[in-house]
Amino acid sequence: MALSEQEAQKASPLTDRFGRRHTYLRISVTDRCNLRCQYCMPAEGIQWIERKDLLSFEEIERVVRVLAGAGVSKVRITGGEPTVRRGIENLIGSIAKIDGIKELAMTTNGTTLRKMAQAYRDAGLTHINVSIDSFKPERFKEITRTDKIDTVLEGIECAVNAGFESVKINVVAMKGINDDELVDFVDFAKVRPINVRFIEFMPFDGNEWSKDRMFTYREMLAVVNQKHEIEPIERRPSQVAKDFKIVGGLGTVSFVTSMTEDFCSDCNRIRLTATGEFKPCLFMLPIVSVRDRMRNGCDDSQVLDAVQESLGQKWKGHPGAENLIKLKNASMIQIGG
C-alpha cells in the first residue's frame, strides 16, 4: 500500500510514497563531454547549457550537506563528462569532507585518468567507474566518434594503481555493435581487481534505441558462460546489478538489467541535474528546481522540501522499454546517468 506524502516524510525525510528510503545522490555537474558516444550524444548534437545556468560548486556542496543531514550517505559525480569541468578535484575534496558521506564515486570516460587518477583519489574519491564499450580501436572510434582508446586504457590501469576502493568498467552492450566482445571484457577483469558491468541498452532521446539492438541480460549471461565459470554473489538491498564472481579470477562481472529485470522496488537513488533540478527516476523529466530556490534565498529546510516534492511524484516502477521510448525525456548526456 502506498504511503501518503505525510506518512512517508514522517518515516524519513527522504522516503517516498512506496516506503523507499533514498540514501544515494547522483549529481550531474555538466552536460559537456570530450567524446561523442552514439548512445549518449544525439548525432545532431544538443544545445549546450550556459555556464550561468549550471549549479556552482558551492550550490552543489550545499545540496549535498542538506541531504547528508537527512540520510544520504553515497554521492556519485557524473556529467556529461564530469572531468571536463574545471576544478572538479576541488568539488571532490569538498564533498568528501561532508559529515555523513561514506562513499564518493565518479563515472568518467577515463580520458583524464592517466594524469589525474591519483589526484582524484587523494582528494577523497573512493570509487570510480570508467565507461568503455569496445577494446577494438576502430570500433571504439566509431562508437565514441573520437580516437582516444589508448588514453582510456592507460587511464584504467592508473585507476587500478591509485588505490580506489573499487574500479568498475561500464559497458553498454548492443547487438550488432559490440556483442562479440563480452568475453574479451571478462578476460580483462579476470586478471585485474576490477568489476566489469554489462548494461542493457536503454532508450533516451536521440540514441536510436530499438528492441533489435538490445542485448538482454539472459543473452549476455549465456555468452559469458560459454567460456567463463562464474558464480552469483548475493544481492545487497538497492543494488542495481546482478554480480558474479569469476572463478579463478581477480575481478568480478555484473549485469545491469534495467530493461528486462528492473530493480525499482528498492530503488534508493535521487538525481540532481547540472541545472539544479531533481529527477526522481532516470526515465522521468526533472520536476523541481532547487537552483532557483537557492538563488532566491531559501533556507536549508526549503532545499529539503524540493527533493521531497520530487520524490512525492516518483513512479512505483518505470514502464517497459517499448513504452519508455515514447515518453518525453532528455539525451543521456543531459541526464548524467
Image (cartoon, rainbow, N blue to C red):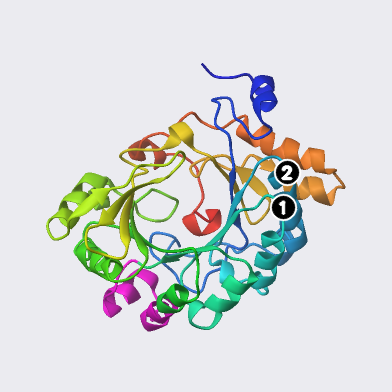
Residue 85 pos. (x, y %): 63, 71
Left or right: 128 in relation to 277: left
**CA gap, disc 2 and disc 1:** 8 Å
Residue lying farthest front?
248
Relative to 81, say whether 271 is above or below: above
* Residue at disc 1, secondary structure: loop
Name the residue rendered at 26%, 67% in the picture.
Answer: 190
Quadrant in the rendering for residue 120: bottom right
Q: Which mark is residue 99?
A: 1
Structural crowding at the residue carrying mark 2, measured as other residues with C-alpha within 10 Å and reported as few (<14), some (14–19) or many (≥20)? some
Q: Which residues are magenta?
A: 133-155
Contact, mark 2 vs mark 1 (Cβ under 8 Å): yes
Three-letter residue code for mark 2? Gly
Relative to 10, say whether 248 is above or below: below
User: Can residue 239 be seen in this snapshot?
Assistant: yes
Residue 215 pos. (x, y %): 25, 51
Left or right: 164 in relation to 11: left
